[in-house]
Amino acid sequence: MKIYKSIALILFFVTFCACGRTKYLSINNTVDKSKFELKPYDFSNASLIYSIDSSGLDKVLKNNHDKLLIVFFTFWCPNSNSFIKTIVNESNQNNITTILISPDDWVYKYEYLAFQQKTNINNPILLLDVNEYSKGSIHRKMDKFVNSFCDDCKDVGGFPSYVLFDKNNSIIYKGLITKDNIKHFIDILK
């Protein structure tokens, strides 16, 4: 009997406490949809929320940078909330161009704007383009996006995860950021 309670407890935590999202919003009214529309990222205003697809990433990579840090995160994941401010501050102090990308749908635009204000982050936040990365598991959408530029990024899958590029757009480091490796990650940025 004890084993069944333990299994039930484990299943509960895995189902309800992991950094996964099952809430899907649908907006059928075109007037409502217009409030949530996102422009493709264009480097003009870093403090906005944009959409991105693989061609948008190509533009980001072609932009002049010594190092480029792409951080995959969500505003609702506890690990992302714990580390995102530190990640952004450290990368900015080390003159690393930093782009924050979330696999959440465009209907969360205002939550991300509020997150930007709450955390005082001025870096652009890009939401995966819903036309290219349709609804489904956020992890599946993120995997599809990551696989569009990296064949060997199986360890980039949780939140927050990162990919660090050099000026030639070669991947220097990649992986998941946890409380156990955050200090190592900060050292990588220096």
Image: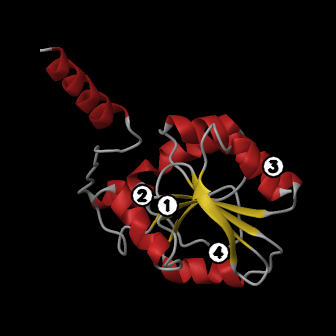
The amino acid type of the residue labelled 3 equals Glu
Crowding near the residue tagged with mark 4, few <14, some 14–19, many ≥20 C-alpha atoms within 10 Å: few
Q: Where residue 183 appears, x then y in whole percent?
A: 75, 43
Residue 126 visible within the image: yes
Of callouts 1 and 4, the N-terminal one: 4
Is residue 71 visible in the rendered structure shown here? no
Label 2 vs 3, first from the N-terminus: 3
> Mark 3 or mark 1: which is in front?
3
User: Is 102 placed left or right of 115 in the picture?
Assistant: left
Q: Which residue is mark 3?
A: 90
Say which element carries label 4.
loop
Residue located 21% across and 27% down the image = 7
Assign a secondary structure to mark 3: helix
Residue at the disc numbered 4? 42
Reading the chain from its start, which is encountered first: label 3 or label 1?
3
Taking the view exactly as shown, the residue that stands out farthest to the top is 2
Which label is found at residue 52? none
Asked if disc 2 and disc 3 are in contact, CB closer than 8 Å, the reply is: no
Mark 1 or 4, closer to the camera: 1
Q: Which mark is residue 127?
A: 1
**Numbered circle sitting on residue 106:** 2
- Please tell me which residue is depicted at 67% across the width and 44% down the height of the picture: 181
Determine which quarter of the picture holds residue 167.
bottom right
Residue at 52% in and 42% down: 75
Give the quarter of the figure containing the C terminus. bottom right
What distance separates the C-alpha of mark 3 from that of mark 4?
A: 24 Å
